[in-house]
Amino acid sequence: MQAEFENVTGVQRVVYVKAVDVAALPQEVQDSAEGRSQLYAVHDDSGEQLALVADRRMAFVLARQNDCSPVPVH
């Protein structure tokens, strides 16, 4: 449940990490959630979802691996 996204500008950008209830996601995503009740979404500054991953730590690692600065959303 890990996705990569491209940073074409070469500048470190801010992305936002937020918890998402699996029940609120499309059925195909729910089916692949492997029994989790929450996943973590990584969004850009316009609100577009860039990735959906299994846990918070993974979301932050993914963001940093893609030259982004992750910020938690509560």
Image: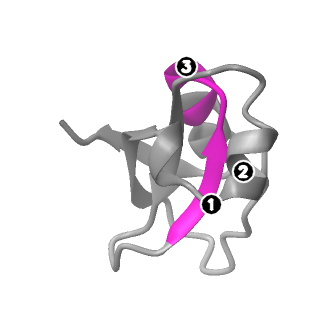
Badge 2 or badge 3: first in the primary sequence? 2
**Residue named by callout 3:** 57
Does residue 1 appear in the picture of this structure? no
Q: Quadrant of the N terminus?
A: top right
The local secondary structure at tag 3 comes to helix
Contact, mark 2 vs mark 1 (Cβ under 8 Å): yes
How far apart marks 2 and 1 lie (CA) works out to 5 Å
Q: Nearer the viewer, residue 30 or 53?
A: 30
Left/right of residue 16 with respect to residue 34 in the rendered view? left
How far apart marks 2 and 3 lie (CA) works out to 20 Å
Q: Which mark is residue 26?
A: 1
Residue 55 position within the rendered picture, expressed as x and y whole percent measured from the top left: 58, 23
Residue extent of the magenta highlight: 49-59
User: The disc labelled 2 sits on which kind of residue?
Assistant: Val
Give the number of the mark in front: 1 or 3. 1
Label 1: how many residues lie within 10 Å, few (<14), some (14-19) or many (20+)? few
Residue 38 position within the rendered picture, expressed as x and y whole percent measured from the top left: 49, 28
Residue 48 position within the rendered picture, expressed as x and y whole percent measured from the top left: 47, 75
**Residue named by callout 2:** 29
Q: What residue do we see at 77% from left, 56% from top?
A: 28
Q: What residue do we see at 18% from left, 36% from top?
A: 74
Say above or below: 25 vs 20: below
Based on the displayed image, in which of its 4 quarters is residue 46 positioned? bottom left
Colouring rule applied to residues? one colour
